[in-house]
Image (cartoon, rainbow, N blue to C red):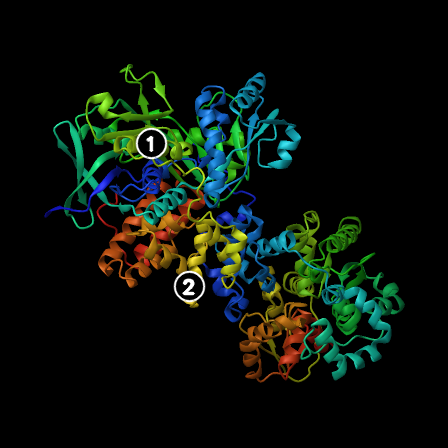
């Protein structure tokens, strides 16, 4: 191992490549700061990539937490504008079922209007006409401006904008040490997982945007943040059952949101405390699957008969108030800690709590604080300036890549927005052939992702393109994608095989908790193709 | 733990495990790169269309609805039905005079039959073909089936109706448009065969075109109307009169049995098992009940059997083949089961002509290599295609059987 001190000076180092870190990198770089973002794995690997992908209207929080509700609806409207290619304007319904108290509906609508959320009571029959998959026994329905947001696209787009404004992004760089001079953090020591090099980077301010892992990052500075890891499990169904977000009109509880996201739909979530030792390897339990199905069927009875693709879980970074060490008084709001004020540690800031919906606001607050420390007066413009991909309408982009087959063209535009235009450069027949058939990902799109979107392995590629996210879960596409990566010299043949095996194992991890019926049949077929026919040996990572 | 024990949803495409064998067996995908193939057009595409209807791709019109994908599928996915249903649901179709003419086989037949000699002559003329090609986009290379002078129905009512009702056992005959307007001889052959077996042949109270061409050309409401009328008439025959319904056309039989419930939502469960193919009925009568026929001691007939796609889907080619084997002096070759390419009205359309002929190419070669008197098949459009594209005559197995009878 080599120790390397990099000379390039930075104003701010951001730790964490989730939505918050990416948003902060974008905001800081747009305000003229020299930015370095370090992430131990790929972008959006933590809670960012492991949630509902719900574009909250805020209605869910209206009764219990007006502040969060107001933040949500404001950010909701901003994201529709600045991140249109990551957002689907589906609207949402809050259903009152016979077992729910209909009196809650009036209270709910009142709270929504207080928070500035459009909430319209509609006739149950009208609700069923709008969303035929909803439970037909519903007795009440309220329509709100919920939607779906793709967190992978959103994060990638923020990263892209940050890079356009000069930010340096280092994925697979894990912070091992916070560099400290007396009572000031002056930089970070990182381990490059790909080269095994250890490097040091220096900046005036270090931002800890590590989500639940921010707990350990703060510890490196000897600082304790009272974080409480809360696990949330979800199920992904094979296709869209609903086209409007379905919620229950009652106090927020387990498994009461069904979100249509891209080609699939998701039911979630559960909520349970887990010890810190488990946060790196979340497993969905049979009890959680049962609960999700039981409650999900109440929103849409069709779920009882719909194929489940995967189960997965994320960890919310909940933070207990500083004056309440017992952890009972947990906030779901945004927590911005200036450690100079809180702990007497200069040059170190932690941003945590909050939710995907408020990532931009969290980034704005953080950047405001960083700018204050650096005496920079530039104003935030991230609520107005559109993200890369959202700057032109889908129809306009479609005209530029008209030579692509129609389904492929629509799929590509839905994933990359106006950046799909870059695929027009691909003109060979091979570029128009498919890597992933379930999600219509072409060779050209994979090449674009490999060349421009910081992809180092198949899992990274999946996050950028949906390769392997369809019903076959990598059965047909994984080997093609690995082959392409190898032929484009992303890695050697040996690494390609290892990557392929680890990708398939990662897919299996999500299938195992719900491995029955056609999902099991398909995974058996997949194992037969890869192991028995192609002779792929699975790495030791396989359990 | 809840294992979703009843997890076969209405969305049958979820049973697809992406093995892709359907696309391997698709005759269109093999020759036309514009067609995405059954896997992509069917289960894969359906998932995308459920996301947003702009994922519907007009290239689905290249599917010739042969259902060979469904026969190949080990997961029992109704791939062909998914594709046809998507066309019905999403296609923004503009009315085309050509499609209307091609789809309304009985209307056009009714108009043409009284003037058959003139119509046949005119349709064969090069200027007519040029006009059909340029104005209607019906390919000029296509040879039209000849219209008969006078329909089978009118012949039957005049000459046979009374005699047939004197038989102790009777069946209803769904003759279809082809027998009625183009080839009444096949209907007459069927009567000869059935009578020889001691069975009288009656007609349904009312028979409408089965509607297969209406479905494939997107005239769904009309197809539904005709389907309902046919099922009513079939019910009358099967349930009230206790007479099963037999058809000589494999496509008519397939449409009534499977397409009515799957694509038109016309329920036929109470009579479906009583609608079958003439060859199956005859074979089972001879093989199971030992009914004997008297055959001529004539010279050898060499025939080659072609399995139409819908016979493959019905799983009934066996009966036609075995029936042919029961005829003495018939020397039978069974051709490889493959699509001839015409698929009803599909091959008549200018834009499909090349695909149609490319699909049939290897079949035509195999036929030409056979030293035979006739190609034999249960489907009339296969017959047109084979007679147009090879030097051989093509006959229905029932006609071959009738020829061999004393």
In the image, taking residue A10 as reference, residue B72 lies left or right, namely right
In the image, taking residue A8 as reference, residue B72 lies left or right, namely right
Q: Quadrant of residue B312?
A: bottom right
CB within 8 Å, label 1 to label 2: no
Q: Position of residue A27 (x, y in %)?
A: 35, 39
Q: Is A176 placed above or below A247 here? A: below
How would you rate the neighbour count of disc 2 (Cα within 10 Å): few for under 14, some for 14-19, many for 20 or more? few
The C terminus of chain A lies in quadrant: top left
Separation of residues labelled 1 and 2 (CA atoms):
40 Å
Mark 1 or mark 2: name the one nearer the start of the chain: 1
Task: Say whether residue B340 is visible.
Answer: yes
Q: Position of residue A440 (x, y in %)?
A: 46, 55
Q: Position of residue B286 (x, y in %)?
A: 66, 65
Q: Nearer the viewer, residue A306 or A37?
A: A37
In the image, what residue occupies the spot 23% across and 30% down? A348
Residue at the extreme left: A2
Q: Position of residue A352 (x, y in %)?
A: 32, 29
Circle 1 or circle 2, nearest the eye: 1
Q: Nearer the viewer, residue B10 or B229?
A: B10
Query: According to the image, label 2 marks what residue?
Result: A425
Q: Subunit of mark 2?
A: A
Query: According to the image, label 1 marks what residue?
Result: A368
Quick one: SS at disc 1? helix
Q: Is A384 placed above or below B170 here? A: above
């Amino acid at each position: 191992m080599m120790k390397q001190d990099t000379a390039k000076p930075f104003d701010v180092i951001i730790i964490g490549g989730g939505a918050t870190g990416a948003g902060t990198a974008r905001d800081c770089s747009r305000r003229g700061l020299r930015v370095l973002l370090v992430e131990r794995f790929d972008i959006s690997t933590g809670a960012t990539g492991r949630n509902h992908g719900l574009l909250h209207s805020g209605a869910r929080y209206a009764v219990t937490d007006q502040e969060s509700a107001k933040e949500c609806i404001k950010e909701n409207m901003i994201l529709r504008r600045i991140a249109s290619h990551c957002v689907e304007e589906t609207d949402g319904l809050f259903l009152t079922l016979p077992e729910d108290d209909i009196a809650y509906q009036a209270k709910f609508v009142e709270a929504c209007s207080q928070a500035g959320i459009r909430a319209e009571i509609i006739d149950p029959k009208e609700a069923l006409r709008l969303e035929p998959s909803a439970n037909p026994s519903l007795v009440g329905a309220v329509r709100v401006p919920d939607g779906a947001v793709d967190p992978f696209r959103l994060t990638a787009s923020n990263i892209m904008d940050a890079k356009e404004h000069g930010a340096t992004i280092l994925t697979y760089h894990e912070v091992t040490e916070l560099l400290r001079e007396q009572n000031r953090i002056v930089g970070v020591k990182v381990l490059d997982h790909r080269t095994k090099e250890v490097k040091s980077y220096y900046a005036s301010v270090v931002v800890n945007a590590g989500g639940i892992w921010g707990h350990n990052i703060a510890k490196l500075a000897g600082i304790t943040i009272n974080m409480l890891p809360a696990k949330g499990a979800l199920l992904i169904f094979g296709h869209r059952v609903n086209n409007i977000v379905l919620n229950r009109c009652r106090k927020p509880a387990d498994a009461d949101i069904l979100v249509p996201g891209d080609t699939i739909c998701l039911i979630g979530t559960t909520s349970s405390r887990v010890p810190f030792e488990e946060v790196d390897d979340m497993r969905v339990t049979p009890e959680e699957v049962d609960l999700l199905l039981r409650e999900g069927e109440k929103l849409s009875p069709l779920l009882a008969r719909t194929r489940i693709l995967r189960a997965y879980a994320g960890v919310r970074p909940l933070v207990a108030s500083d004056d309440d060490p017992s952890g009972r008084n947990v906030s779901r709001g945004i927590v911005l800690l200036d450690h100079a004020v809180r702990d007497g540690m200069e040059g170190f800031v932690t941003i945590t709590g909050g939710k995907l919906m408020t990532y931009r606001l969290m980034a704005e607050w953080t950047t405001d604080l960083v700018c204050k420390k650096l005496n920079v007066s530039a104003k935030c413009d991230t609520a107005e300036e559109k993200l890369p991909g959202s700057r032109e309408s889908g129809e306009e982009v479609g005209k530029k890549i008209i030579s692509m087959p129609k389904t492929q063209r629509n799929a590509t535009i839905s994933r990359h927005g106006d950046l799909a235009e870059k695929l027009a450069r691909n003109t060979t027949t091979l570029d128009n052939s498919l890597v992933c058939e379930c999600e219509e990902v072409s060779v050209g799109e994979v090449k674009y992702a490999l060349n421009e979107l910081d992809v180092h392995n198949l899992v990274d590629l999946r996050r950028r393109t949906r390769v392997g996210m369809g019903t076959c879960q990598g059965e047909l596409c994984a080997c093609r994608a690995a082959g392409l990566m190898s032929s484009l010299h992303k890695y050697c043949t040996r690494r390609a095989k290892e990557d392929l095996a680890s990708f398939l194992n990662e897919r299996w991890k999500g299938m195992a908790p719900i491995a029955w019926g056609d999902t099991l049949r398909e995974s058996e077929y997949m194992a037969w193709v890869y192991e028995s026919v192609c002779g792929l040996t699975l790495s030791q990572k396989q359990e | 733990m809840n294992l979703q024990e009843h997890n076969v949803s209405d969305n049958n495409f979820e049973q697809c495990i992406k093995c892709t064998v359907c696309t391997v067996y698709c005759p269109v995908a093999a020759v036309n790169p514009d067609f995405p193939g059954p896997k992509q057009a069917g289960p894969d595409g359906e998932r995308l269309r459920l996301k947003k209807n702009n994922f519907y791709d007009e290239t689905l019109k290249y599917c010739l609805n042969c259902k060979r994908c469904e026969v190949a599928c080990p997961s029992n996915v109704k791939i062909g039905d998914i594709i046809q249903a998507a066309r019905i649901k999403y296609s923004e179709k503009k009315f085309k005079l050509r499609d209307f003419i091609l789809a309304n086989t009985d209307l056009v037949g009714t108009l043409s039959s009284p003037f058959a000699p003139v119509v046949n002559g005119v349709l064969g003329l090069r200027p007519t073909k040029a006009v059909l090609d340029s104005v209607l986009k019906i390919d000029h290379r296509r040879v039209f089936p000849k219209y008969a002078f006078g329909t089978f129905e009118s012949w039957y009512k005049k000459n046979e109706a009374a005699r047939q009702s004197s038989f102790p056992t009777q069946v209803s005959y769904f003759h279809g448009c082809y027998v009625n307007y183009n080839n009444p001889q096949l209907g007459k052959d069927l009567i000869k065969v059935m009578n020889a077996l001691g069975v009288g042949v009656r007609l349904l109270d009312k028979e409408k075109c089965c509607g297969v061409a209406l479905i494939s050309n997107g005239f769904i409401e009309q197809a539904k109307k005709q389907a309902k009328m046919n099922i009513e008439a079939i019910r009358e025959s099967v349930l009230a009169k206790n007479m099963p319904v037999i058809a000589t056309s494999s496509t008519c039989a397939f449409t009534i049995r499977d397409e009515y419930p799957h694509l038109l939502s016309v329920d036929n469960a109470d009579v479906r098992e009583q609608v079958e193919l003439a060859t199956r009925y005859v074979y089972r009568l001879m093989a199971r009940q030992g009914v004997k026929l008297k055959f001529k001691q004539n010279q050898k007939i060499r025939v080659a059997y072609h399995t139409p796609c819908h016979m493959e889907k019905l799983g009934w080619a066996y009966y036609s083949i075995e029936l042919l084997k029961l005829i003495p002096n018939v020397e039978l070759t069974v051709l490889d089961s493959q699509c001839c390419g015409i698929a009803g009205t599909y091959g008549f359309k200018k834009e499909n002509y090349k695909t149609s002929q490319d699909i049939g190419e290897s079949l035509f070669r195999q036929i030409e290599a056979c030293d035979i008197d006739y190609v034999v098949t249960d489907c009339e459009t296969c017959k047109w295609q084979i007679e147009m594209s090879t030097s051989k005559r093509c006959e229905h197995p029932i006609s071959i059987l009738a020829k061999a009878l004393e």
